[in-house]
Amino acid sequence: MKLDKVIAVRASKTVYRDGDYAIKVFDAGYSKADILNEALNQARIEETGLNIPRIHGVTMIDGKWAIISDFIEGKTLDILMRENPQKHDEYLDLFVNLQIEVHSKKTPLLVKLKDKMHRKISQTNLDAATRYELHTRLEGMPKHDKICHGDFNPSNIIITDDGKAYILDWSHVTQGNASADVARTYLLFCLHGDKPTADKYLDLFCKKSGTERQYVQKWLPIVAASQSVKGNPEEREFLLSWVNVKDYE
């Protein structure tokens, strides 16, 4: 197995290409449980019929854990949007359609989104009253069991030369309320300084799915708080600026 062609570098992991395979190698200190769980979750998503890279193995390489999956040749939707600004709306339409397709699937053994968010809110440095308000709001949200990607953004969509779309990076997948997943995507656009696209995305998703915009907005402080646990100080500060439940009453 050759590790001489780097195709992506992320915090605590590096992705290499070896022929038809992508090999994600994790840093030595990375949690074995998290790595095995990521591979298991991706295998479960494969079974739904969604168009994703298939898992081929989990192994050790030079003392580090690695996940081997299909290498998908193509460009990310993020790159295509930047290279073809005249097609931005067309790409955004495709993006929303793909997310709606994800939400149409179910697989009952995934971690529940609400449980994960409760844990993360408890880990924040927010004051007790704010944490209590967030936990209460979260518990009062409708319970669904739709697949929620957890990091659905244009850089996780690969478009092949023949126009086929593949959805990557299932490490954050849960089952739960689709509007929480939409709130996460909205915040990701904002986090990258593109609020106009964030607003256009939200309007388009709500129109296509028949979801009230205000319903998604009620998730924003909850999702922002739960996502603030990880990330660099700048991201944390940005996300915590959204944690004001009164703004979305």
Image (cartoon, rainbow, N blue to C red):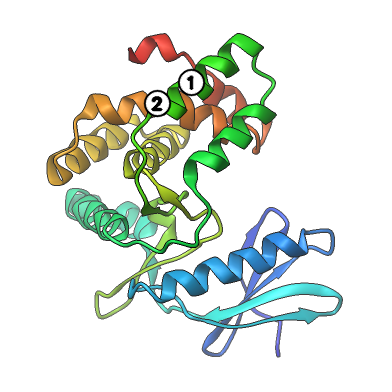
Residue at image point 21% right, 43% down: 205
Q: Which mark is residue 100?
A: none
Give, as a three-letter code, the residue at label 2.
Answer: Gly
Q: Considering the numbered disc 1 on the image, is that residue within a helix, a strand or a loop?
A: helix
* Front residue of 9 and 100: 100
Q: Nearer the viewer, residue 208 or 46?
A: 46
Q: Is residue 197 left or right of residue 148?
A: left
Which x, y percent locates residue 16?
A: 63, 76
Q: Position of residue 229 (x, y in %)?
A: 65, 33
State yes or no: discs 2 and 1 in contact (Cβ < 8 Å).
Answer: yes
Instruction: Tell me which residue sits at (69%, 60%) in the image.
Output: 34
Residue 213 falls left or right of residue 35: left
Say which amino acid is labelled 1: Thr
Residue 28 to residue 112: above or below: below
Residue 203, horizontal then vertical, whole percent: 19, 35
Residue 204, quarter of the rendered image: top left
Q: Measuring from the top left, give residue 132's x and y in whole percent.
A: 57, 16
**Is 38 left or right of 159, judged from the image as shown?**
right
Q: Residues within 10 Å of mark 2 (few under 14, many from 20)?
A: few
Q: Report the residue at 45% width, 65% height from top.
A: 168
Distance from label 2 to label 1 (Cα)?
6 Å
* Mark 1 burial class by Cα count in 10 Å: few <14, some 14-19, many 20+: few
Label 1 sits on residue:
136
Residue 125 vs residue 154: left or right?
right
Considering depth in this image, is 235 or 85 the residue closer to the camera?
Answer: 235
Tell me the residue that label 2 is attached to: 140
Quadrant containing the C terminus is: top left
Labels in figure, total: 2
Residue at disc 2, secondary structure: helix
Q: Quadrant of the N terminus?
A: bottom right
